[in-house]
Amino acid sequence: MNTLKNKVQLIGRLGAKAELKSTAGGKVFTRVSMATNEIYKDANGGKVKQTTWHNLVAWGKTAEIISKYTEKGSEVTVEGKLINREYVGKDGVKRQTTEVQVTEVLLSGNKSPAV
């Protein structure tokens, strides 16, 4: 039997310092953005750099590692799954977002001066 999986791997740089937060029930988590870059040539042979931003969420020990050992601009590799969720914004409007729920993180130690 062939089982399909929801799995994603990304290598990129964090867009901010991850802050550790906790739920009312005491579970720790962090949310942070990550930029990935793709460089390719357009039809005229010109170099094009395309940046995509991803929303990451991590729980427990993974969240603690990300918040303790990374800074804005830190290069990390993350593995996890895509989560779609709905929320109501401060303006009362219902919105949808897609996040990567991080289950594993690899710190590269490479930091850029700015994202």
Image (cartoon, rainbow, N blue to C red):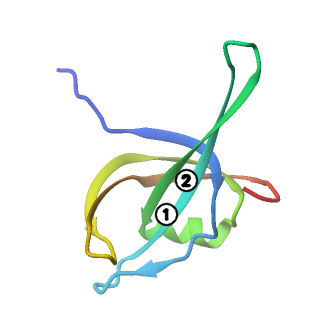
Seen in the picture, residue 30 relative to 10 is either above or below; the reply is: below
Residue 61: x and y, percent? 47, 68
Q: Which residue is mark 1?
A: 62
Labels 1 & 2 near each other (Cβ < 8 A):
yes
Q: Is residue 102 left or right of residue 107?
A: left
Q: Which type of secondary structure does the marked residue at label 1 adopt?
A: helix
Give me the residue at 47% from left, 56% from top: 55
Quadrant (top left/top right/bottom left/bottom right) for the C terminus: bottom right
Q: Is residue 89 left or right of residue 59?
A: left
Q: Which residue is mark 2?
A: 105
Seen in the picture, residue 35 relative to 14 is either above or below; the reply is: above
Residue 75: x and y, percent? 69, 51
Residue 30: x and y, percent? 47, 70
Residue 50: x and y, percent? 64, 36
Give me the residue at 35% from left, 46% from top: 82
Q: Is residue 97 left or right of residue 42?
A: left
Query: Across the whole image, how many numbered discs are drawn on residues?
Result: 2
Local packing at callout 2 (Cα closer than 10 Å; few below 14, some 14-19, many 20+) is some
Which residue reaches farthest left? 1
Q: Nearer the viewer, residue 82 or 4?
A: 82
Q: Nearer the viewer, residue 66 or 18?
A: 18
Give me the residue at 54% from left, 58% from top: 33
